[in-house]
Image: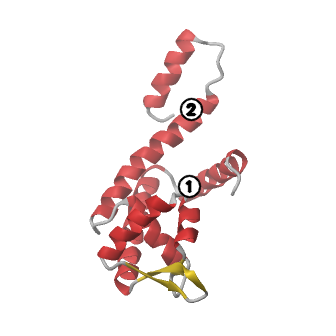
Amino acid sequence: MTDKDAVDAIIDQWAAVRPDLDTTAMEVFGRVYRLARAMSGRVEEAYARFGIARGEFDVLATLRRADAPFTLSPRQLSATLMLTTGGMTGRLDKLERRGLVRRSPDPHDRRGLQVTLTEEGLALVDEAVGAGLAVQKRALESALDAPQAEQLAALLRQLLTTAAPAD
């Protein structure tokens, strides 16, 4: 048995006032939520060393995953990141000012634009993704061995595909 956490205290309180409730789902989702918040802060710190916030990292990483020539339209970026066009424009403005992305006319659509990762942006995102993964890996390895981590990943995948099917 591991030490009790903040979710255990909440579950104990519910058990005292509503012993009829099955709080199993609350135990799982409460921990997932708290873990995501805790890790988000740590990963944000890792990205901050590169002068970027999580949202900017997400744009750079989406372009990086697109593979050479690391180009997508603003619409593709917005859809992938589930952002409004206004929200995307703000991020792109900031990244372009820093020289991490370049906007150019789309040669296949004269009304459209393309966003391309610059060499500086490519180098930055490659370093930042490594730093963010290192933070996550340290947290994971401090609590779970490799088979446990694989089992947890499989269980969370199963839950996620059921609770939030892919768009």
Q: Amino acid at mark 1?
A: Ala
Does the residue at mark 1 contact the one at mark 2 (Cβ under 8 Å)? no
Q: Position of residue 130 (x, y in %)?
A: 40, 71
- For image coordinates 36% across by 67% down, the residue present is 131
Q: Nearer the viewer, mark 1 or mark 2?
A: 2
- For image coordinates 34% across by 83% down, the residue present is 120
Furthest residue in direction front, as rendered: 111
Which corner quadrant holds the C terminus?
A: bottom right
Decide which of tag 1 and tag 2 comes sooner along the chain.
2
Residue that carries the numbered disc 1 in the rendered image: 149
User: In the drawing, what numbered circle is on residue 35?
Assistant: none
Quadrant of residue 82 within the rendered picture: bottom right
Label 1 and label 2: CA atoms lie apart by: 19 Å
- For image coordinates 58% across by 52% down, the residue present is 148
Q: Is residue 4 visible?
A: no
Q: Position of residue 7 (x, y in %)?
A: 48, 30
Q: Residue 140 or 27: which is nearer the viewer?
A: 27
Q: Residue 31 or 91: which is nearer the viewer?
A: 91
Relative to 63, is 52 above or below?
above
Quadrant of residue 102 within the rendered picture: bottom left
Residue that carries the numbered disc 2 in the rendered image: 27
Kind of element beneath mark 2:
helix
Q: Position of residue 161 (x, y in %)?
A: 70, 52
Q: Residue 61 or 90: which is nearer the viewer?
A: 90
Q: Is residue 53 visible?
A: yes
* In-image side of 142 versus 74 (left or right): left
Q: Residues within 10 Å of mark 1 (few under 14, many from 20)?
A: some
Q: Residues within 10 Å of mark 2 (few under 14, many from 20)?
A: some
Kind of element beneath mark 1:
helix
Quadrant of residue 123 within the rendered picture: bottom left
Q: Amino acid at mark 2?
A: Glu
